[in-house]
Image (spheres, rainbow, N blue to C red):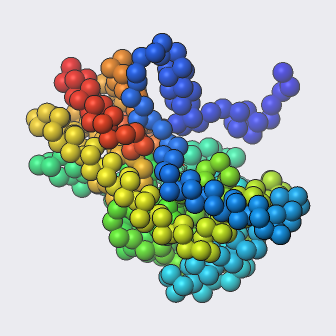
Amino acid sequence: QPQLSTIGQQMSHLTGVRAIMKDIIETLQSGGGRDFIDLSAGNPVILPEIEQMWRDCTQDLLASPDYGEVVCRYGSSQGYQPLIEAVANDFNQRYGANLTPRNILITPGSQSIYFFAANAFGGYTAGGNLKKVVLPLCPDYTGYGGVSLVPEAVVSYKPSLEIDEENHRFKYRPDFSQLQIDDTTGCVIFSRPCNPTGNVLSDEEVGKIAGLAASYEAPVFIDSAYAPPFPALNFTPMTPQFGDNLVHCLSLSKAGLPGERVGVAIAHEDIINVLQSFQTNACIHSSRYGQAIAARAIASGQLAHLSESVIRPHYQRKYAVLAEALQQEMPKHLSWFLHAGEGSIFAWLWFRDLPTSDRHLYNELKQAGVIVVPGEPFFPGLQEDWPHKRQCLRISLTAPPEALVQAMKRLRGVVEA
Ligand code: PLP
């Protein structure tokens, strides 16, 4: 075994949910024919209309004289020009933005944007100061836990909770009395809608975070992997926000193209230049095939249209089924709370008086034939030992409605026991 560097050691560990996924895959594979209900998946459902759209775009590419140019050659590290133009035109028309191609970078998936950002804007400066990667509230995307080559740079803050005891609902809000954005802040990252909670920060909350960060010239990366215009997995109205220090980060993964690795950063040209150089050093550019079919789906307006008419209703229905099943099944006297379902492909459950840990509850549910994801990995960067971290579960809305209902019946049995 060659000796690993500090970074090598750190990057060769699985962090967050990836570590639990290993256990889940082993459980499913060694299940011995047992019919587990799998509510752990982060992979989107393959929706027939969406698959057909990607097939049509592929056929169009195959028939086009551009085919050789697209797949047989390297391209610009900024991205495939027709895709950059399609995104700029779409956002200019839709939101009255004033984007030029210089404001756009195409990356191999959006995860890479956060990796480039966390290490370009966060970490140690030449003067030896630690610039932090601030997650303004947790829980948030577990993938932020592994993005920095300087792990101590990632810090997150406890939210405040709005609790509706009567209806067993709750919602997280940024706690501005705790949140520290100051001259130690390198950049800010949050997902909106949020994986795992389905929370959508209000335009006002986003504005406030952006304003704080602007005072210290820190860029704010708004992870819009579930946001409009595609995949439009918001169940509550929300408007993408733009501004000099805001970076709007798109992903095509939840719009049916996770395998092709296409992410988009939209920002001030100075920020784009930094990210683009980082990307050139790391991996040159994203898949050109993926970019070429994405350009077609966006330019025709089909992707935005099908996102609203097919993708959003699919998951919104699932959330409604789950909420109804919980209301029917779960004992009223127990203190369980479902997070407000404002978007994403997940639901988030909190058990306030859980006498054990999320990990134990996950194991007990596994015994009952239901696989969920324990909540603790979704608090990356939170140093404080907060009991709430061990009281939550993430439930994927990718399972069929009957499976969701059946799983909530089994959950009831476990929780009662
Ligand atoms: N951000 C969030 C909130 C996600 O849920 C995911 C994937 O699940 C990603 C980023 C990474 O997506 P991509 O496939 O674009 O790298």
- Pick the residue in front: 402 or 229: 402
Residue 233 placement, left or right of 123: left
* Image point (41%, 64%), residue name: 309
Find residue 333 and report its image quarter.
top left
Q: Where residue 104 appears, x then y in whole percent?
A: 68, 73
Say whether residue 84 is visible: yes
Q: In which quarter of the image is the N terminus?
A: top right
Residue 338 placement, left or right of 304: left
Residue 60 placement, left or right of 215: right
- Pick the residue in front: 370 or 172: 370
* Image point (70%, 73%), residue name: 84
* Image point (51%, 47%), residue name: 46
Relative height, residue 178 to residue 298 (above, below): above
Find residue 215 and report its image quarter.
bottom right
Q: Where residue 56 appears, x then y in whole percent?
A: 63, 61
Find residue 204 and report its image quarter.
bottom left
* Image point (53%, 78%), residue name: 242
Q: Where residue 112 appears, x then y in whole percent?
A: 67, 54
